[in-house]
Image (spheres, helix red, strand yellow):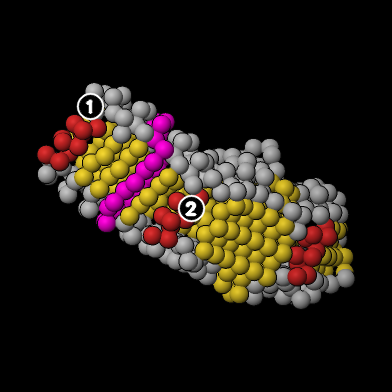
Amino acid sequence: MLSLNFVPIEMEELWGVVNSLTRLRKLCISNCERLQGIRFSSVSLQKVYLFNLWSVLFVSISAPILRLLQVDSGLEACEHLEVYAGKLRTLQIDGSAVLRTLTVRSGRVNHLEVRNCQDLDPRCLQAVLLDNPLLGELRLGAVANEELILDHITCPNLETISILDDFTCAGLLVRCPNLRVIQTAADEIEILSLQQVIVVADHLARVTMHGLPALRNLLVQCDSVQHVEIKMCGEELVCLRSFVIQATRSIGLLRFLDCAVGALILSAPRVHTVVLYRCQIEDYTLQMTLNGCPNIIHLSVEKCDTISQVCVPANASLLKYLNLYGCHGLLRVAVDSMGLLAVNLGQCPKVRFFVRGLEYDLSLHPVCKYPKVVLPHQSLRWSHDHKPQLYNIP
């Protein structure tokens, strides 16, 4: 390993040093203020790290067995980056808001991270994706595109997309059959630009959108999806105009936390769990969701004070668990389906409960009768599992 930190080296000297070390495997260069550019060729290098090189104008690396290149923050003058490395697997680039051109000749990149590249020519990013069909993981920050489109031609083997905190696109359209995960990179971030997300894939494992206050429309079309979650951290709400999931096989867990939902459209033969927690949703919106997709097994509408009535239609025969805990404005619950096993009306002080047209007197109703009912005066919360667990709230 060779580490050059605060070394007054120039480009020609760097070329000579790297070429003379024929067994050099790892190179780290930082804080070299006399270095105006980086250009070298090496037949042995496998890992290169560059950071805090504020005077470097360009980087050109030729290393046939290079496997990892990390260009970190601090290359504040570097506008051009080119890499010729046939075995490159991992490429991490922080463009420091100045990078304009990017050339990667590899064909084997599996992990790509691009951040702070708002001046990067969109054609360069497109070319990098097309030249690396084996790309499996993509981490995206700021790029120049107003709307970013990723499809099966540019990313045929893409499995994971992570949206970083400096992401600047207003729209993200993904059509990748092998995609498994699309997510924001951290829980407690805030991305102010992203307004629309469209995902088309075969079998999705996870779709998590955290900290997106500007998100207005989300559409997912797939064969199946295991976990979808949208939430905000803090007091702000995600004001979704529309949320649509079409799955030809099944939807696993769908969870909204601190969202205002204008339209919730689900289409699937089986929906295991739908959770609305501290959400603003109108009676009509929820009713249309239940009428349009009667195949929900566990519906949890918890602490949603805008709800005043819930009507479970007769064709919702798969619904087993209905959780309405803490909906203080709830006045009426009517269940017309046959398969319901349990209802949670805890902390719903004004509610009246009807089953197939007959009203239950909740002041007399024993908890053990069918369907099992958590009474309004009780504080028994349910988990969001497929078969909910009970939590006693003191």
Magenta extent: 73-95
Q: Is residue 78 magenta?
A: yes
- Identify the residue under disc 1: 9
How crowded pointer 1 is (Cα within 10 Å; few <14, some 14-19, many 20+) is rated as: some
Q: Quadrant of the C terminus?
A: top right
Q: Position of residue 348 (x, y in %)?
A: 79, 50
- Identify the residue under disc 2: 123
Q: Is residue 309 left or right of residue 20?
A: right
**Disc 1 residue type?**
Ile
The outermost residue toward the front is 12
Q: Nearer the viewer, residue 134 or 317?
A: 134
**Pointers 1 and 2 in contact (C-beta within 8 Å):** no
Indicate the quadrant where residue 168 lies: top right
- Which residue is found at the position 27% from the left and 33% from the top? 29
Q: Quadrant of the N terminus?
A: top left
**Disc 2 residue type?**
Arg
Q: Does residue 39 sit above or below 227 in this rendering?
A: above
Q: Position of residue 277 (x, y in %)?
A: 68, 50
Indicate the quadrant where residue 320 lies: bottom right
Residues under labels 1 and 2: Cα distance?
Answer: 34 Å
Q: Is residue 91 left or right of residue 351?
A: left
Q: Does residue 362 sit above or below 12 in this rendering?
A: below
